[in-house]
């Protein structure tokens, strides 16, 4: 399986669980609690990435970044978006300098 396939599979699961009863899964619980609960988890996990980085524990960093990605994917699903949408944006940015890309956002 290609690595990007796991993102598609997780997006598929999130899409299904978005419609499920709140008590059926963690993702369903977050979706039913709403955007603020999801955003709170994204911020909480981002803080844990920061702490793992400061500790210098590479495995811990990987695990915490995985948590940020997962909760960001839940947020995408909440808005009817998928990981593939982000991948397409990253692909669009290929071969564009970071300086030029940032300047294009200001226009």
Image: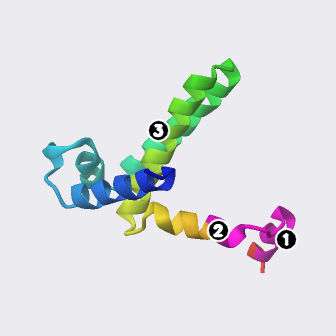
The residues tagged by marks 1 and 2 sit, at their Cα atoms, a distance apart of: 15 Å
Query: Nearer the viewer's eye, disc 1 or disc 2?
Result: 2
- Whether 51 is among the magenta residues is no
Q: Residue at x 24, y 54 (%)?
A: 32
- Whether 100 is among the magenta residues is yes
Q: Earlier in the sequence, mark 3 or mark 2?
A: 3
Asked which secondary structure carries label 3, the reply is helix
How far from the left and from the top, in percent, is residue 107?
78, 81
How far from the left and from the top, in percent, is residue 59?
57, 24
Q: Which mark is residue 100?
A: 1
Q: Residue at x 21, y 43 (%)?
A: 25
Asked which secondary structure carries label 2, the reply is helix
Range drawn in magenta: 90-104
Circle 2 residues within 10 Å: few <14, some 14–19, many ≥20:
few
Q: Residue at x 67, y 73 (%)?
A: 92
How far from the left and from the top, in percent, is residue 94?
73, 67
Q: Which residue is mark 2?
A: 91
């Amino acid at each position: 399986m290609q690595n990007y396939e796991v993102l598609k599979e997780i997006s598929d699961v999130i899409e299904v669980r978005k419609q499920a009863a709140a008590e059926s899964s963690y993702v369903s619980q977050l979706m039913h609690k709403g955007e603020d609960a999801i955003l709170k988890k994204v911020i909480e996990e981002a803080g844990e990435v920061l702490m793992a980085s400061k500790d210098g524990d590479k495995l811990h960093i990987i695990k915490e970044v995985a948590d940020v990605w997962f909760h960001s994917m839940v947020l995408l699903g909440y808005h009817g978006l998928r990981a593939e949408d982000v991948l397409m944006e990253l692909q669009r940015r290929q071969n564009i300098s970071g300086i030029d890309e940032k300047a294009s956002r200001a226009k």
